[in-house]
Image (spheres, helix red, strand yellow):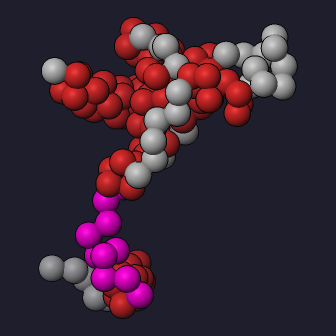
């Protein structure tokens, strides 16, 4: 039961009612479902779009994605969708599970253990899902 005297609860109820009236499908919106709409780019496509196409000596896709993963972990892994998608793309760009785990673990020194734990949990979801699909 929600507290109707809490201004935050009232605002959330109004926002949910507005979203439902505009698009009933938003009532059951899932960020993971949204992620499924975005294809995983190939390593070559990532490098063309984000690096090597402009500077042949620039960072490769794997390195760029590991740096992005570090930054997302530093933010406390608050952007769950972004972190999961970055792990998925990093795997596609050739990063190993150990490299992904090490990148996230390294951020514990700067972002703290809770951020690292959340990052590891989200990365593990992606890696476990990828393993299930390859079996």
Say which of 49 and 31 sits in front: 49
Q: Position of residue 35 (x, y in %)?
A: 40, 48
**In the rendered structure, which segment of residues is drawn in magenta?**
22-31
Say which of 113 and 29 sits in front: 29
Q: Indicate whether 37 appears above or below 62.
A: below
Q: Indicate whether 102 appears above or below 42.
A: above
At x 58% / y 17%, what residue is drawn? 62
At x 70% / y 33%, what residue is drawn? 49
Q: Indicate whether 134 appears above or below 21.
A: above
Is residue 7 visible to us here?
Answer: no
Report the magenta stretch's main SS. Answer: helix
Q: Position of residue 80 (x, y in %)?
A: 42, 44
Q: Position of residue 2 (x, y in %)?
A: 22, 80
Q: Position of residue 34 (x, y in %)?
A: 39, 55
At x 41% / y 87%, what residue is drawn? 22
In this figure, what is the number of numbered marks? Answer: 0
Residue 27 lies in the magenta-colored region: yes
At x 41% / y 52%, what residue is drawn? 37
Horizontal side of residue 63 vs 5, given as left or right: right
């Amino acid at each position: 039961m929600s507290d109707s005297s809490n201004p935050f609860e009232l605002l959330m109820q109004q926002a949910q009612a507005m979203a439902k009236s505009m698009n009933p499908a938003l009532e059951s919106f899932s960020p993971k479902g949204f992620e499924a709409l975005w294809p995983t780019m190939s390593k070559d496509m990532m490098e063309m779009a984000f690096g090597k196409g402009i500077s042949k000596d620039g960072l490769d896709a794997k390195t760029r994605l590991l740096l992005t993963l570090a930054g997302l972990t530093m933010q406390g892994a608050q952007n769950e969708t972004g972190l999961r998608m970055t792990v998925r793309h990093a795997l596609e760009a050739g990063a190993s599970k150990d490299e992904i785990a090490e990148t996230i673990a390294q951020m514990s020194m700067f972002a703290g253990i809770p951020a690292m734990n959340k990052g590891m949990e989200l990365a593990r979801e992606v890696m476990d899902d990828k393993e299930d699909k390859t079996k």
